[in-house]
Image (cartoon, grey):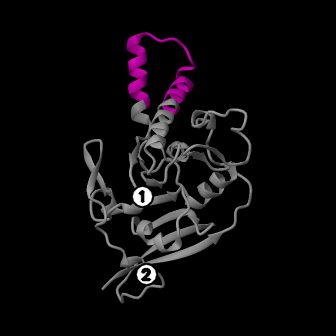
Amino acid sequence: MACDTFTIMIMHINGRAPTNIPVDGCSVNLFQSNEDMAHLDQPLKEGNVHISAPHIYGSALEALELIPNSPLSFLNVGSGTGYLSCIVAEVLGPRSLNYGVEVHEDVVEHSRASIEKWKNAREKQITGGKRLSPTSAQAIKRAINDAAPHIEIIHGNGLQISASSGESVVGFDRIYIGAAVERENLPKITKLLSPGGVLVGPVDDELVKVVRIGRRADGESSQSMNDVDDNIGSNQAMMAGNELFDID
């Protein structure tokens, strides 16, 4: 019986953000309310709304090995404010698939509102903030929507995503875990990786990078990633009229 094989690396945070990530269109002020603290290299937290320190996002983005303007699929588990999802969207471009799962309903609403602010900010960048006729404004808005990746934020528990239906059957090319996960729960997320896919996230207080290598016919694996029940979820989550995945 074939099983998945993975490589796991422990990453050390280097305290710097990469210089090649285009974040100009994703001002952190769009995703949280404390403007005085927004650009400090420290985490920000207000109730359930949490934004990691910039150097954490920088290290994670480098580790994810994003390919600009590509059709990669991205899953953000514990997507929080949606800040990282929007940065990834800026990098991957309109051909990509971009999904987030967040357990706190108030944070889901916050992130959806913030993503709308991000979209509006992108529109202003293109128009230069000029007043346009209704016809021109609608045409530009359609063009912007066509050129921007769709980001779908879903309310649910990322540890309860089924790998047996929807997009999860194919697997995700890149996965980021936005909340700390215990090592025994990691297989519930790594099972969602596509072959060659990359996962990055905090596991037992360490930033971990997981790469799915492929399948081995002998059934042997250094990680027991194939021992997880694939049918945990029960409620269908929908995106653009198509089944995305099952989630409880």
Magenta range:
118-144
Q: Is 192 positioned to the left or the right of 9 in the image?
A: left
Judge by depth and name the residue closer to the eye, 144 or 227.
227
Above or below, 200 against 4 in this view is: above
Q: Is 76 positioned to the left or the right of 31 in the image?
A: left
Q: What residue is shown at x 47% (from left), y 59% (from top)? A: 174
Label 1 crowd bin: few (<14), some (14–19), many (20+), radius 10 Å: many
- Element under disc 1: helix
Query: Dividing the image into 4 quarters, which one contains the C terminus?
Result: bottom left
Q: What residue is shown at x 39% (from left), y 65% (from top)? A: 192
Query: Dividing the image into 4 quarters, which one contains the N terminus?
Result: bottom left
Q: Residue 149: image x %, image y %?
A: 43, 41
Q: Nearer the viewer, mark 2 or mark 1?
A: 1
- Residue 158's disc is 1
Identity, as a three-letter code, of the amino acid under mark 1: Gly
The overriding secondary structure of the stretch rendered in magenta is helix
Snapshot quadrant of residue 239: top left
Q: CA distance from mark 2 to mark 1?
A: 19 Å
Q: What residue is shown at x 56% (from left), y 17% (from top)? A: 129
Label 2 crowd bin: few (<14), some (14–19), many (20+), radius 10 Å: some
Q: Residue 63: image x %, image y %?
A: 60, 61
Q: What residue is shown at x 36% (from left), y 89% (from top)? A: 218
Mark with earlier residue (2, 1): 1
Q: Which residue is mark 2?
A: 224
Judge by depth and name the residue closer to the eye, 234 or 237.
234
Snapshot quadrant of residue 162: bottom left
Identity, as a three-letter code, of the amino acid under mark 2: Ser
Any magenta on residue 135? Answer: yes
